[in-house]
Amino acid sequence: MKNAPRPLRLLLLAALLISAAPALAANAAAAQKREHLTPEEIEFIRDAQKLDLRTGVFIKAAERRLLMIADPASKQLGKDTEKWGELKGTRRQLFDDVYRILDEAVLNIDDTAQRDPKSALLNKSLSKLAEAARRFLPQLAPLRDSTQDDGERKTLDEVIEKAEEIVEAAKRHDVDAVPEKEKSGKKGDKEN
């Protein structure tokens, strides 16, 4: 009878481990998940209450990663680091960041469209995002040829597809690109 509690304890411990395994696995996966924005960029997004300003922050974040991929020694990256945060990661991670940034920008626009379909900022935001996607596409296509890693190429193809989807969405909604003079608007409107 002295041995009876030990198997019971082992059985309880095994049951506890089995029931905790999914939670432990989920925590491990979450810990491995990379944040696609720097803490500074996240603050800019929180501060940008207007959709068009928030879209501008997403565009700036994507542009920084594309510049990091194309020219890691760029002086502009150095200038932006203090204000926008330091960028880190492999090319594949940076491509994934760009994809997730563009996706988050689209989700913000979609969310506003659901809540306030008559918002004047919807067309302006989609226009800004589509104009940026049009600029990104010619930068991304040549990178496909220089990419040797299959995983990196797949991630790059996803970014290209997301940019093309944004351009197509702007066409479907009959949204034109924001004219240059509108972009340079008031100094206080610009986040970068």
Image (cartoon, grey):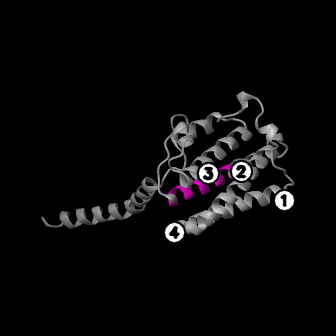
Residues under labels 3 and 4: Cα distance?
A: 19 Å
Location of mark 1 (residue):
172
> Which element is circle 4 on?
helix
Left or right position of 15 against 96: left
Q: Earlier in the sequence, mark 3 or mark 1?
A: 3
Which of discs 2 and 1 lies nearer the camera? The answer is 2
Q: Earlier in the sequence, mark 2 or mark 1?
A: 2
Name which quarter of the figure residue 58 lies in: top right
4 and 1 marks in contact (CB < 8 Å): no
Left or right position of 113 against 106: right
Q: Where is residue 97? Give x, y as percent.
A: 56, 54
Residue displayed at 41% across by 61% down = 25
Residues under labels 3 and 1: Cα distance?
A: 22 Å
Type of amino acid at the residue the image marks with label 2: Ala
Along the viewing direction, whichever of 176 and 66 lies nearer the viewer: 66
Which of discs 4 and 1 lies nearer the camera? The answer is 4
Name which quarter of the figure residue 43 lies in: top right
Q: Does 96 appear in magenta? A: yes
3 and 4 marks in contact (CB < 8 Å): no
Q: Where is residue 137? Give x, y as percent.
A: 69, 59
Type of amino acid at the residue the image marks with label 1: Arg
Along the viewing direction, whichever of 141 and 18 lies nearer the viewer: 141
Q: Does 55 appear in magenta? A: no
> Which element is circle 1 on?
helix
The magenta segment: 92-106
Residues under labels 2 and 3: Cα distance?
A: 12 Å
Which image quarter holds the N terminus?
bottom left
Check disc 4: other Cα within 10 Å, few if <14, some if 14-19, many if 20+. few
Location of mark 2 (residue):
132
Location of mark 4 (residue):
151
